[in-house]
Amino acid sequence: MPLPPPSPDQPAVITGASLGIGKAIAHELAARGYPVLLVARQGELLEALAAEIREKYKVGADVRVVDLVDPEARSAFQEELASLDVSILVANAGFATQGLWHKGLDYAKERAEVELNVVAAYENTLAVLPKMLKRRSGGVVLTGSNAGNNVFPTGSTYAATKAFVNTFAESLHFDVKSQGVHVTLLAPGFVETALKDDLKAGLFSSSLFTASAEHTAKATVDGLVKNKLRVVPILAHKIQTAMALYSARGLYGRASQLLVGRK
């Protein structure tokens, strides 16, 4: 079944919409006629983006300033989500940490990473799913990562969170496919965003292996329309994905350790 057509009463909700992939997907969906609900912590950036979208695409653009790490704020937002007729959810909010546990990693920040990357993405999806299933129409994008395909020394929490998202998204895809709901995993390598600055992986974080946010957004929405299982935006990322999925974990881990340059 196709995605629901754009309707003023059925917003596309994008979390992590203020920057990078989320911002680019907001533009891509608005360009296709979808009203958008933009969600992030940075209110000023969201308001500026909403104004730009209204002016450029002549569609509705609303803002919700929410810290999805905070369980109370997240719960209140999910109550609102459940009350809306959401056409598309893009569960994109997330951040990355990198470092060694014996060299000063902030345990509270690592826990917050799990709350945002895993718990928020999971709960937000569950909030919109019942109405999508009832009307047999809707779309969900979950932003995972190639980092979730194998081990990632110095990025253990990030890799674990993305392994959850990757597996949840692809499993859910098959669970709801027959019910008219599209679920697509976005699992890129490095994308030119602020998150790229938080991670280092030698050659794999170089410009040669980096996709633009705009190209990634278009590939993602095109993939959702076709109900693709997984979107990997550029050839370099596809090569990385194959290496991660089909390499022995011990060998891949050691090679990654050498690329990152930390022992």
Image (tube, helix red, strand yellow):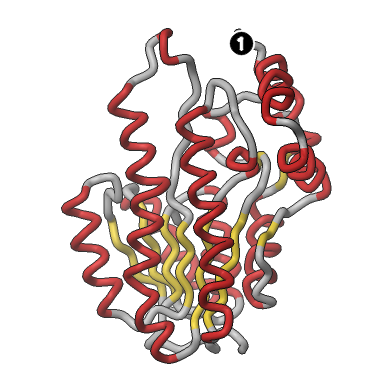
Where residue 100 sits: x, y (%)?
A: 47, 14
Q: Toward the viewer: 14 or 137?
A: 137
On screen, 16 above or below 138?
above
Q: Where is residue 167 in the image (x, y as percent from the top left)?
A: 55, 54
Could you tell whether 126 is left or right of 157 in the image?
Answer: left
Q: Quadrant of the C terminus?
A: top right
Residue at disc 1, secondary structure: loop
Q: Is residue 115 left or right of residue 23?
A: left
x 63%, y 51%: residue: 187
Q: Residue at x 61, y 10 (%)?
A: 262
Read off the residue under disc 1: 262
Above or below for 124 versus 73: below
Q: Nearer the viewer, residue 15 or 148?
A: 148
* Rendered residue at 43%/84% (across/down): 133
Q: In this view, does 257 lie above or below 94?
A: above
Measuring 29% from the left and 62% from the top, which residue is drawn there?
64
- For label 1, the crowd category at 10 Å Cα-Cα, with few meaning under 14, some 14 to 19 and many 20 or more, is few
Frontmost residue, 187 versus 245:
245
Up/down of 258 relative to 83, above or below? above
